[in-house]
Structures are given as C-alpha cells and as structure tokens.
Image (cartoon, rainbow, N blue to C red):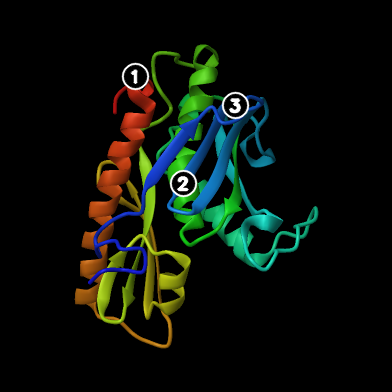
Amino acid sequence: MLRIDGRQPEQLRPIHFCRGFTGASPGSVLVEFGRTKVLCTASVEEQVPPFLVGLNKGWVTAEYSMLPGSTNPRKSRERQGRTDGRAAEIQRLIGRSLRAVTALEALGPRIVCIDCDVLEADGGTRTAAITGGWVALVDAVASIRSQLPEPTISPIKQSVAAISVGLVEGNFLLDLSQQEDSQAKVDLNVVMGGDGRLVEIQGTGEEATFTEEELAEMLRLARRGIAQLTELQRQVLGADWPIGL
C-alpha cells in the first residue's frame, strides 16, 4: 500500500533536527516530522517546585502550545492561564516522558523546562515534541555540567523518543500525517526509551475496537520506528551523546 505522500506503511516521514536553532536557551532544537515542525527550547532555573524544597533533587517539566499560524484555519492564541485541555494533556505527557529518563537527584536542585511550540502541525506534534525535546534537554544539561552534584555523572539515563501508529483502512501505518490520523480507526502514540522499554502508550479506537493481536502489531511497528528515531538522535548529537548511553 502506498500512502498519501508515497510512503510505505512502515516508513517514517523525513525527520530532521536543527540544534542551536535559537541562541537565548541552552537547549534549542527545531524538529521536523515531515511537514510537522516543533521548536523545542530547554531553559534551566535555579529553583525547584515547592514539593521538592529541601530534597536536593531537580525536576523536568514541559509546556506545549500551537502557534496561531500552525494550522489552517488559524488557531486562537492561548492566553495566560487559559491553556486548553488538549495542550495541558500533551505537556504533561512530554514532562513525564523526559523525567522517565532523567536521574533527578543527579540534576541537583534546579528545574529544566522544555517549551514545545508547534510552528506547523501535520500530525504527530506530541511525538515530535518528545523526540526533539529530549535532544534539547541533553544540550541544556550539558550547559550546566560543571554545576551538577557529580559532574562526571550525567543525569540523562538514556534516550527517549515517541511515534504514532494507526490502523487505516485495514492497514497498519507508522508515523501518521494529519489526514491519515483523521481516517484512522485506531490511533496509538507510543513513548519508548532507547533501551526498548516502554514509557507510555496512548491508544484509542475511533468508532471501532481493536484486538490484542492488533495492539501487538502496532507496538512492533512503533518499536521499529523508535529505533530509527533513536539512531537519528544519536547522529545529531554526535560526540555530545550523553555519557553512559
């Protein structure tokens, strides 16, 4: 089966990372999954949330938003304190995914905040944000390496990436575009560490149900895609690939 954009069912869209996309944040990555473009910036704050005061450990959190021109028709700009439900759910997912692969005690009493701003949306914005956000996190942590409790020990335990899988017209498809996502009977978002262990699975049947066998096939496809994303992360970081990975 050839897809709308000519891809094979198990083929990712063209994936690109541009590190150092902006200069104001120690971590800044423009990640592209096909036409989907997300700017991921990582900032370091020398403070911790109230629930971590006195525990000598850090925190990784995330914020996510879609810029007005990222979709057609235009999306209304989010105002302070008015994050919509979808954005709130996605930014919690990004934060959980990045904390899962970070040793918070090794980070010391500080926050790394990953801001994920969607410049153009064509499906898979959350998976692109997680995959690019991790690269930005690595760069931000590298910028404070000498200030860590144990500078020779990286707080980054391993890599993490995410990908979507769907069941469209009876076919299992990897890395869905927006049009494919809108046609999918089943939509799965999978977050996985570089060691192959799962971080989170979000799966939904749209006016449909799915079997355990179909779930297993979608996970197999996701694993294959995430292995490719992990290799791309390794290539873009090069010599900056975190110690111990």
Q: Is residue 8 left or right of residue 204?
A: left
| Quarter the C terminus occupies | top left
Residue named by callout 3: 109
Type of residue at label 1?
A: Ala
Task: Determine crowd level at label 3: few under 14, some 14-19, many 20+ residues with C-alpha closer than 10 A.
Answer: many
29 over 239 or under it: above or below: below
Residue 104 visible in image: no
Which badge, 3 or 2, comes first in the chain's sequence? 2
Q: Disc 2 marks which residue?
A: 32
Q: CA distance from mark 3 to mark 1?
A: 27 Å
Q: Tell me which amino acid carries mark 3.
A: Pro
- Please name the residue shown 66% across and 38% down the image: 49
Q: Position of residue 8 (x, y in %)?
A: 24, 62
> In screen coordinates, is 22 left or right of 196?
right
Q: Mark on residue 239? A: 1
Q: Is residue 228 above or below residue 241?
A: below
**SS label for mark 2:** strand
Q: Position of residue 140 (x, y in %)?
A: 53, 26
Decide: is 110 above or below 167: above
- As helix, strand or loop, the secondary structure at mark 3 comes to loop
Asked whether the beta carbons under mark 3 and mark 1 sit within 8 Å of each other, the answer is no
The residue at the point 31 percent across, 75 percent down is 167
**Label 2 close to label 1 by CB (< 8 Å):** no
Choose mark 3 or mark 1, whichever is in front: 1
Q: Compare marks 3 and 1 and give the one earlier in the sequence.
A: 3
